[in-house]
Image (cartoon, helix red, strand yellow):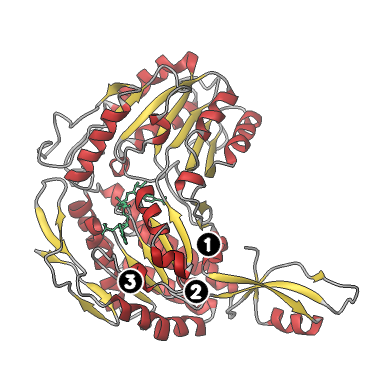
Amino acid sequence: MIRLESYVNGAWRAGSAEGRPLVNPTTGEVIGSVDATGVDVASAFQHARRVGGPTLRGMTFAERGELLGAIANALAANRDAYAEIARVNSGNTASDAAIDVDGGIGTLKYYARLAKGLGAHRALIEAGDEQLSRAETFRARHVWTSRMGVALHINAYNFPSWGLWEKAAVALLGGVPVIAKPASATAWLSERMVRDVVAAGVLPPGVLQLVCGAGEDLLDELQPMDSLAFTGSAKTGDQLRGHARVLEAAPRVSIEADSINAAVLMPGTGSGSPVFDVFLKEVVRAVSVKAGQMCTNIRRVFVPADQAAEVSEAIRAAVGKITVGDPGVAEVKLGPVVHEGQRQSALEGIRHLQKETRVIAGGDTPENALNADPKRGAFVAPTVLAAESAADLGLVHELEVFGPVLTILPYRTQEDAAELCRRGGGSLTASLYGEDPATLAATALDIGSHHGRVLVVDPVVGAGHTGHSIVMPQCVHGGPGRAGGGEELGGLRGLRFYMQRTALQGSPDMLKAVEASAAPAAL
Ligand code: NAP
């Protein structure tokens, strides 16, 4: 049986209680446990403050980039083991695991490259030299320096690799040591990855620590210069935001929560057109890839009312071809959700949505699963729901069913489609599929205020896009309102969370001296 440990204060430590079970969701078998009872998290924070922080702040951006590159190389050397852990502990198919594992390694490499460009500096300086008074000799520049705190990262179960590394990469580049807490259900992959990086000997002491277990006492350690970056459900996000210590110490807080993302088939995009095919492929991916457990996943599909019947039938037929079963079998496109509790939650969510919709595919546990028992494993059939009209509905715009589930909703005009997208109350991602760049541009701007990212597919983009659900490190990730209001990644923009912008007022000579020791950057 696997018993996960935490890496704190330079050593691996096991919790003292039985902890929570780790389960293989394909078979329901218990494979180990995770627990952090008695792990001294206060000493982890101290270690980060006294050792990790000063070490990182003493390194230039280029040196921190080398560290990120070395972490990526250590992980790449063990990639095959990660796919196996992801299959056994998360129910991932090989391509599901690649999104998580390669996404993490790729993000580290991307930030390693960005760091190289910032060179041998430790601070950033923005363009723009402002004269503040009559005297030309009194001016201002804006500079960024590393916050002297600890980055506490609390991650969701669906991305034990990418979630860990996309946050750590930016914090470490920003000069801030990390304490990461993976979600218990899938912490094995995070633990194994950190073990490999520690074993590779590339981590300076105190720059990266890992707490595997409930970690409820972590927030008690937060200080004003720290930051808390959380990814998970809106419910937990609200709890953490209102935590007494968070309110008292006022660390920086970023919440990446759930979201009712939309895909819109624009008017006049008929079946048979290449853009329609791309749209259909993305919709099918939403109910197969990672068993629908992606925060950016398409949950609502808006289609022109006069095409609704035809599009629903095309989606039903394509979804009917998805092979459900053991994620280790090559033909399987849809594995189980993470555990029985998540299956029950998804099935309950489907039942709630049925108050406003009808089932046109799936809707329950699948009858068959290739090389698996659909009753023992945590399987949910790929599920497509539909409604006659979207306007008067509530649940479809509010309830995230975290599994292979989406709802097709008709709309009448381009303005209606935009309004319906906004009914999600703030989302991570929307995607638009159409032929006319001007209409697409107008719709993208109409929904921009409510979205962190909008993917626009026209005939020129065609199949050459990176995917509705895939987060690219070059682009910001996060959404307003119910999506949590956070913003991560986006190249150097991600550094805002870990560095402090200071308006520096003084003489041209003083500002020149600062400029000489800072990398130019536009955050
Ligand atoms: P969750 O239940 O909210 O848990 C998220 C994390 O919070 C886990 O690590 C959990 O630890 C931890 N946690 C819970 N209570 C805590 C407390 N009192 N103190 C400290 N930590 C605490 O979410 P999940 O089920 O793992 O993930 C699924 C949800 O995440 C979905 O709603 C999905 O939309 C969302 N998500 C959002 C994004 C995004 O970028 N916006 C990305 C991925 C997922 P334990 O596991 O140990 O309980």
Label 1 vs 2, first from the N-terminus: 2
The residue that appears at 47% across and 76% down in the rendered structure is 149
The residue that appears at 44% across and 42% down in the rendered structure is 467
Label 3 vs 2, first from the N-terminus: 3
Residue on which the image places disc 1: 494
For the residues labelled 3 and 2, the Cα–Cα distance comes to 30 Å
Q: Nearer the viewer, residue 180 or 112?
A: 180
The image quarter in which residue 294 lies: top left
Asked if residue 464 can be seen in this view, the reply is no
Q: Amino acid at mark 2?
A: Met
Residue on which the image places disc 2: 225
Q: Nearer the viewer, residue 459 or 154?
A: 154
Q: Position of residue 237 (x, y in %)?
A: 39, 54
Q: Position of residue 219 (x, y in %)?
A: 36, 67
Discs 3/1, front: 1
Do labels 1 and 2 touch, CB within 8 Å?
A: no
Residue on which the image places disc 3: 74
Residue at the right extreme, as displayed: 134
Residue 160 is left or right of residue 2, and the answer is right
The residue that appears at 49% across and 13% down in the rendered structure is 306
Describe the element under mark 3 as helix, strand or loop.
helix
Within 10 Å of disc 3 (Cα), the crowding (few <14, some 14-19, many 20+) is many
> In the drawing, what numbered circle is on residue 87?
none
